[in-house]
Amino acid sequence: MLKSLIGRPVMGLKRLVRNDQLVTSVAALVVGLAAAAGAVAFREAIVGLQWLFLGFYHELVASGAREAARWRVVLAPVAGGLVVGAIARWLMPGGRPQGVANVIEASALRAGRMSARQAAGAAAMSAISIGAGASVGREGPAVHLGAALASFVGRPLQLTRSQSRTLLGCGVASAVAASFNAPIAGVFFALEVVVGHYALSALAPIVIASVTGTIVSRIWFGDFPAFRLGDHEIVSFLQFPAFALLGVVCAVAAIALMRLTEIVELRTSDLPARWLHPAAAGLAVGVVAVWYPEILGVGYEATDDALKEQYGFQMLVTLAVLKILMTALCLGAGFGGGVFSPSLFIGAMVGGAFGIVASHPFPDLSSGHGAYTLIGMGAVAGAVLGAPISTILIIFELTGDYRLTIAVMIAVVIASLITRMWHGPSFFTDQLRRRGLDLQGGHDMAALRALRVHDVMRQDHIAVPVDATLDTLRDRLRQAPMNELFVVDADDRLVGTITLAELGEAAFDHSQDADRCAGDLARRSPPVLALSDDLQKAIRRFGEVDEGLLGVVDDHQGTRLVGCLHERDVMRAYNTALVNLRKEEHGETL
């Protein structure tokens, strides 16, 4: 009796300790603390580096730059660019800084695994870039650092692929929450951008990490919104067409930023002395900053001033154009940093300028252009990040004001839709595309992209030599899968394929047996797949050619036949990937 009374609680405790959700939740708490500490340290490092480069120890960069010597304002970004270029050349693989795009890649393709060494180098590059005045954001690097710390914490725990990806999301959520004092936005950004689903198995740990990150941030920096918004509200429903039109204008600004960044990156990639590119971009930033110091760094001070309606129309337009140019130049040339803060800045200036124009004819139907400033911030940022839900929440938590909810939602959705149609899903997918990675289509497609042709191909194909007789072809066709033969030369290079369609009348007419061989009947240049192709490409290829069997060659340049791929095997692998994905998302045994 006593043994039974003691045994049940002990067994329950053992099950609790072994419970995967408990392990993930405890790990989420640790990751939340680590990522938040990393975000706080990163932000403090930026302020310290600002003192080193620009001579002031506070976050009001524009005000500090106005009081600094002109030579220092010009040379600080140049010096920072030299240091960043040197780090990129000698210490960073690939010679480029890393950010949110790398986190998305790690989640989709590497089961949440990231390099701690590369993360440290990327954080150093970004802190130096922002501290020296480069026109970039600090949130992307903080997210990358938080995700890398999560990967480091999870490495010895032997977690499943799903748990590792969830832990990566925990690091992202904590970093976002700590950077913005925005716990709700942190949760949704991690789920929307990194994890890719909203299952409870991922939601609970990510909430824990986000709340932890918020607490750490509030202990260190205090509990107050990043921006102070004046008394603005929707005065009349006649304003809604203007809000929709603002979404269109903000989409244009977002597309301009992303296109220019891509152009700069592509144009500079082939230029010599690549490690000097950031310094050259820094010189341009420094010269412009002598007259317009607002474009230096993350630009939160100028964004706040725009919300307070302290700029006129000409200044707003000028700052919007300059910020687009300088941010594109800095990011394209190789400075480390993110794109969120610049997006807020650009959106604030575009929205403010639009608000002045929209309010001028009917001043009684407007509460001031500060409201349009806030709406523009959300619209540009949502379009650039490709994360409308997270952006809407971030805007509200940054300002602590929910009175313009409907207006922000309208503009963000319209800007995001137009940007997706005319440019692409987001700035991050642009970066991945330039690296040759297509991660669109959800995590079911990502699971297919993680599988290669060599994982599911067979070697049950039947190959015949070029000089095979018709009699041999008839005999081998009866044995061949899908009644298809592969014709190869003496070095096993694929020459073509033969089916009953190619054999034609010769299948029954033996009169030409002495005159014709396999090489004469083969269909030349048949559709093939390479060993390294992923299964998403294989599915697309099967759909294009409407065949059930394709040959597999050694690589894209070679033609040596190494096997064959059945369409049914690809579909079976796809179904298996979907089932496993649902298991991972919901923690179920199907």
Image: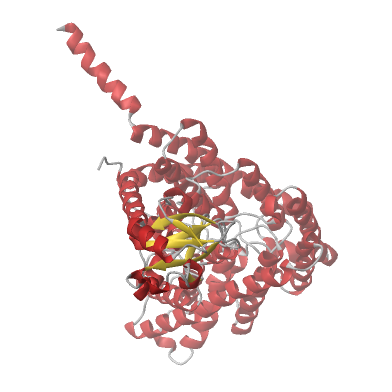
Along the line of sight, the residue nearer the viewer: 533 or 177:
533
Outermost left residue: 1
What residue occupies the far right of the structure in this picture? 71
Residue 21 lies in quadrant: top left
On screen, residue 373 versus residue 243, left or right, reads right
Q: Position of residue 396 (x, y in %)?
A: 42, 62
Answer above or below: position of 404 versus 550. Answer: below
Q: Is residue 15 left or right of residue 385?
A: left
* Coloration of the structure image: secondary structure
Q: Residue furthest bottom?
A: 361
User: Where does residue 389 sit, x and y in percent of width and height?
Assistant: 39, 63
Q: Is residue 21 toward the left or the right of residue 420 in the image?
A: left
Q: Which one is nearer the viewer's eye here, 386 or 73?
A: 386
Residue 551: x percent and y percent?
A: 46, 60
Q: Nearer the viewer, residue 394 or 563?
A: 563
Location of the C terminus by quadrant is: top left
Residue 308 visible: no
144 versus 288 height, above or below: above
Q: Pick the residue in front: 388 or 75.
A: 388
Does any portion of residue 69 appear in the rendered image? yes
In the picture, which quadrant includes the N terminus? top left
Q: Which residue is drawn at 40% across and 71% down?
A: 545
Residue 535 as seen in the image, left or right of residue 557: left
Count of numbered badges drawn on the protein? 0
